[in-house]
Amino acid sequence: MKHRIEFINEQNILPVNGKLKLMLSSAITKALARFSCPPAGVTVTFVDNEQIRNINREQRNIDKETDVLSFPLLDAHEGILPKISVADTDDGYVALGDIVLSAEKAYAQAIEYGHSPAREFAFLTVHSALHLLGFDHMQPDEQKKMRAMEEEVLSSMGLTRKD
């Protein structure tokens, strides 16, 4: 299924190139493909640690940097979206939500966890896409379910824990 994935780069610490955008588009598409998701619109914004800390403080009242934030626009629950027809949209895409990713934090975590930056960026993007679909990880069973889906998508992209 074709989705509209837009990228906005609001940081200048790490380059955001076409290869990264293509990989993250694939990650989102593969995550959404697991569910009956109509053509969806997702925006991915790259920020630095200071910017994501400010957003985290303003939106969640947590005054610390984080790696990724998800801002769903639909009231989805575990991959079940409300009944929305693309005919009801202005552009043929259901606005699913926004992903805000700290490129700085993602790169640091890749080093910390001992895998490639590609894997960390893809992991955070899939994680956030699942949040847009109404998944959460507050309870152990929810976390286990999310981790399994994340690893399935990453494995399908050739990004294993060793990468």
Image (cartoon, rainbow, N blue to C red):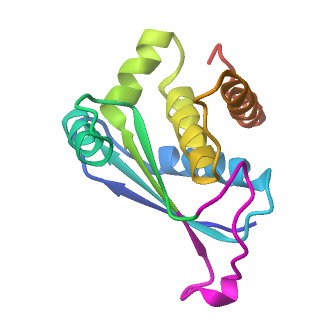
Which quarter of the rendered picture does the C terminus lie within? top right
Numbered label tally? 0
Q: Position of residue 117 (x, y in %)?
A: 48, 26
Q: Residue at x 42, y 14 (%)?
A: 111
- Residue 115 position, x and y percent, is 54, 16
**Is residue 102 depicted above or below 3 in this figure?**
above
Q: Which of the two residues, 96 or 120, is positioned nearer the viewer here? A: 96
Our reading of the magenta stretch's main secondary structure is loop
Among the 4 quarters of the image, the one containing residue 157: top right
Residue 150 falls in image quadrant: top right
Question: Relative to 151, is 113 above or below?
Answer: above
Please state the extent of the stretch shown in magenta in the rendering: 75-96
Q: Is residue 101 above or below residue 107?
A: below
> Of 57 and 118, which appears nearest the observer?
57
Residue 19 on image: x %, y %:
51, 46
Task: Tell me where residue 2 appears, x and y as whole percent.
Answer: 70, 68
Q: Is 91 a magenta residue?
A: yes
Verify whether residue 90 appears in magenta. Answer: yes
At x 35%, y 46%, the residue is 46
Image position of 32 (left or right of 23): right
Image point 24% across, 36% down: which residue? 53
State the image quarter where residue 159 is shown.
top right
